[in-house]
Amino acid sequence: MYDITKLTIEEFNTKIRKANERLNAEKTRLGVSDTNLEDLGALMGDLVTPDTWLHTWELYAGGEATCTSNVRKGISSLRTRIENKLSSIYNDIPASIWNDDDRSIFGRTTGAKDAPSKPGVIADNCCATAVAMGGGIMKISCKTATDQSRPSLAKDSNGVQIAYIVVDQPTKDGVPDPNTVKRQTITSPEQCTHKEFFMEASFRLELGPANAGRNLQFFVRYYNARYPANAGPWSDSNSSNIA
């Protein structure tokens, strides 16, 4: 069996497309949940949705004209996220179900030998900082309250959930002016219009150039996508201007 982490990027692209097709075609026999398939499908995406594999791959494979440093970073990040998602799915498929075709396509002898232990409720608070990268891109970095040295995930989590909304800045003659009009302030995650999940402690929100000059308000928490009931506490409200 091959090690998916050691495949070239071209081999990886071929294998994950076949694995995605197999999981969807054989989901009933393999016992793959709709949630897992939806999560994987969201990562695979399509040719027109940014920050998905199929869209980013087209840019990556397009040569110097489209394969920028940001595209290379994006394809690397997506590879890690897809590797983790596939490993989680494979580990949930009972060993008795695997056949030779599964082993060949998935590159695994079988699923986990023992059922993975269920994680506990996430206790750590999530502390976030946001940096405007330009072009409507915001880099969000999350740290635990007990370790501020670097971005990291909390125990029992497998990613970060963010709830956010983009609101207008008060302006006067086109220039931000907080003294003229009171800006909308969000006090609860339930007031946010978007929720997303990222499998890294540091990730990018691509809000688009049209939102430059507006204000991002958001909450974050450590999250386990397989056990959403065990999610950690939401952070306090965060606010950052988009550039």
Image (cartoon, rainbow, N blue to C red):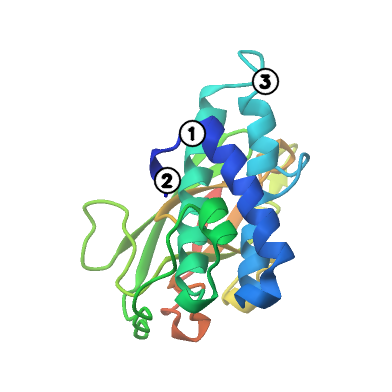
Residue 185 visible in this rendered orientation of the protein: no
Q: Residue 211 at what x, y percent from top left?
A: 70, 43
**Residue under numbered circle 2:** 2
**Residue under numbered circle 3:** 62
Does residue 208 appear left or right of residue 232 in this picture? Answer: right
Does residue 189 appear left or right of residue 80 in this picture? Answer: right
Helix, strand or loop at mark 1: helix
What residue sits 75% from the left and 45% below the top? 46
Does residue 54 appear left or right of residue 220 in this picture? Answer: right
How far is the residue under mark 2 from the one under mark 1? 24 Å
Residue type at tag 1: Lys
Q: Residue 89 at what x, y percent from top left?
A: 52, 67
How far is the residue under mark 1 from the one under mark 3? 15 Å
Q: Residue 102 at what x, y percent from top left?
A: 56, 60
Helix, strand or loop at mark 3: loop
Q: Earlier in the sequence, mark 2 or mark 1?
A: 2
**Residue under numbered circle 1:** 73
Which of pointers 1 and 3 indicates the residue nearer the eye? 3
Q: Are marks 3 and 2 in contact (CB under 8 Å)?
A: no
Residue type at tag 2: Tyr
Residue 207 visible in this rendered orientation of the protein: yes
Residue type at tag 3: Gly
Relative to 207, is 229 above or below? below
Q: Earlier in the sequence, mark 3 or mark 2?
A: 2
What residue sits 66% from the left and 46% below the top? 207
What residue sits 66% from the left and 27% below the top? 59
Relative to 115, is 209 above or below? above
How far is the residue under mark 3 from the one under mark 2? 27 Å
User: How many residues crowd mark 3 within 10 Å: few (<14), some (14–19), many (20+)?
Assistant: few
Q: Quadrant of the C terminus?
A: top right
User: How many residues crowd mark 2 within 10 Å: few (<14), some (14–19), many (20+)?
Assistant: few
